[in-house]
Image (cartoon, rainbow, N blue to C red):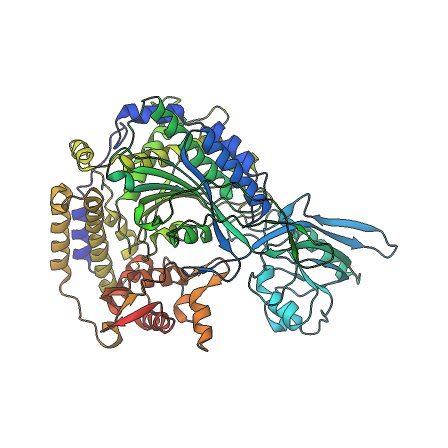
Amino acid sequence: MNKPFVALALALMMSGVAWAQKPPLLPEKDVAALANELSGETAKRNLEGIAQFHRQRGSQGYHKAAELVAERLRAYGLSEVAILQFPADGKIYYGTQRSRPAWDAESAELWETNDSGGQLRLASYAIEPVVLAEDSESADVTANLVDVGEGTSESDYTGRDVKGKLVLVSTQPGAVQDLAVGKFGAAGIVSYAQNQKTAWSGENLDAIRWGHLDTFSKNKTFAFMISLKTAHAFQERWKKGETILLHAVVKAGQHPGNYEVVTATIPGADTKLKEEEIVFSCHLDHQQPGANDNASGCATILEVARTLQKLLNEGKLTRPARTIRFVFPPEIEGTLALLNSKAVNLESTAWFKYFKQGGKEWESVDWEPKQEALPAGLDWAKRIKAVVHMDMVGGGPETKAVFHVTRGPMSLPSFVQDVAWAFAEFVNEQSYEYAATGKANYPFISPEGGKEPLRAEYSFYTMGSDHDVYQDSSFGIPAIYLNDWPDRFIHTNLDTAANIDSTKLKRAAFIGAASGYFLAILTAQIYEEISRHGSIERVNEMWEAPRRVEQLSPDESDKMLRLWSQRSLAKLDSLASFMSISIDVIPEASYLEEQQRRLAEASGPEAPPTGDGLMKFARNPSLKGPMEVFGSNYLADELAKRGVTTKLKLLEYSGLWGRGEEYAYEVLNFADRNRNAQQIRDAVSAEYGPVPLDMVVEYLKALEAAGVVERVE
């Protein structure tokens, strides 16, 4: 460990700017107006409305939720309210996303039949839609149930005759359908897959996990999801030698449809800057109830929309220079469709509502969703300056949630996340003061909600929602990501409105509203006024580097501190670019430049790259989006077309602070024509922990073979 180097880094960090108890960035009258108007109760009422629908992509339930959101936006007085449609048929691509055909279910039931002919209903789609796995197909099957454990390897089926039978598995249906159904001839799947791994996983025996089949598998089938309690009861009966006979009836299937994206605006006031947009984003799809994931994010940005429009109408806020837009898409795939589309599809597509009895096709009916026209030819991605994305923001004490303001990826340094953290830290301070003393200027509590302090955390970049799409290097749009994790009820039937805290919704709404509004009004003039009292870029991320460098070799720790120092300066550059001013105007820039110089002197020159480390790559500009999205893996599909099926080592890699998919995401983002493979390797190592150069090179060459990047000589 280079102890003098680390000591110098610590010394350079000691000049951070801290906010007082007064509100940051915005005038106190604006903060007071937002705090007084935002309502956790109003947000929760809207959440309860959204949570009543089973919101699968392209489904009737999703459309009803979209209509509800659009109606609320109209009632709140927003402009350009529309439900945009993007065809989804399993063939059309939106950048790297192969569209998934819409999926609907009419009914599904699972029964157990005893020797006397009596029946016990085990699952009903009408009562609890989560029991039917997404992408299930119609069936009417009576068969014995066979336990095959995980069901993901051929050895799980050794000695078990599953042909024409139903298989009980502990994993997601999509992970077993090609083996169980395709290879061994099972008639269907019953799964008791557990939830994402947290400290509480598997503790609630009654929880039923949201299940998924593989959208594009050739082995079409159906799957029911059951609780751990039900699965254990089956297994105990098998030990006694019993046979379990089940009857499954399903009316469901895929069909051509549309991704629907609800959108509305608060138009900007500046003649030029109104063409720039600050976007509030969430995702409207998910299973019923899906209260925290993600009715909470949608209801919260609805509340932001209502509040901002009302305060503007009343003259309590100044109309922003930039346009503020609200979007409610299907998660990731709807965002990719939006950002990859320059022209809005205004052709209404017939919806498919009723299942043809006894068949496997959907009947078209004369019923089409409303849609208001928007100007065609909009280049959505170029208009958007920044995004406030909310995905799970309402978890109360029962969910065990920790609230995060998430930094952007190292590949896209931006000041916008520091804006959100300034407001989040203010809420932390005020809510703690209120919880500890019963007094605070801004307690941010709701009458029906809790009084606990927020305790938000400013977290390093993590993946898993639409912020990945926006911040992918093909779009390069910085995003504020507000989210809860862990959440003990995510993707289960227990993610209900009863577990949502209206105080938490109000606090998330304030952080988002204050951040988005500030970004919408931010100009060089506003910045000059703020600079008299503090700084926007106030969080030097090198503060947290020493917690990590202790795990690294001297060489790796030196590289890490230098790269994080460069990131801090790049964030200031993003601020200057946002306001179209020179970085020299920003006082902190000279300090950070000096910091970089002194760190470089202390660490000495870097060893020059050799061999494969010298290679440079640039992205294919016509192919936009991450490599892996729901049901679609562009890189794997393209490599398979070329006969390449070998697993890439980087995707299997686990680093000190990151997983293979995170390394891969950033490796592609860093392929910018300028960095060589060694520099890309060093950058992702500083972000997620050291990774072998050969893994990075192998992944870059795979991207090249698939046409995602090209070699730069």
Does residue 1 appear in the picture of this structure? no
Q: Position of residue 27 (x, y in %)?
A: 25, 27
Out of 651 and 517, give the one closest to the viewer.
Answer: 517
Closer to us: 528 or 87: 87
Query: In screen coordinates, is 93 left or right of 588?
Result: right
Which residue is at 13% across, 63% downward?
604
In the figure, is residue 676 to the left or right of 256?
A: left
Q: Position of residue 233 (x, y in %)?
A: 72, 54
In which quadrant of the rendered view does residue 82 lie?
A: top left
User: Residue sitting at 48 percent across and 36 percent down?
Assistant: 70
Q: Give the image location of residue 683, x and y in percent.
A: 27, 61
Q: Quadrant of the N terminus?
A: bottom left
Query: Is 156 rendered above or below residue 336?
Result: below
Number of marks drawn: 0
**Image point (32%, 46%), residue name:** 384
Query: Where does the image place residue 298, in percent across and percent down from the top left?
Result: 47, 39
Q: Is residue 376 above or below residue 679?
A: above
| Quarter occupied by the C terminus | bottom left
Is residue 492 visible in the rendered structure shown here? yes
Which residue is more in the foreground, 608 or 91? Answer: 91
Question: Which is more toward the observer, 362 or 522?
Answer: 362
Residue 483 vertical placement versus 438 (above, below): below
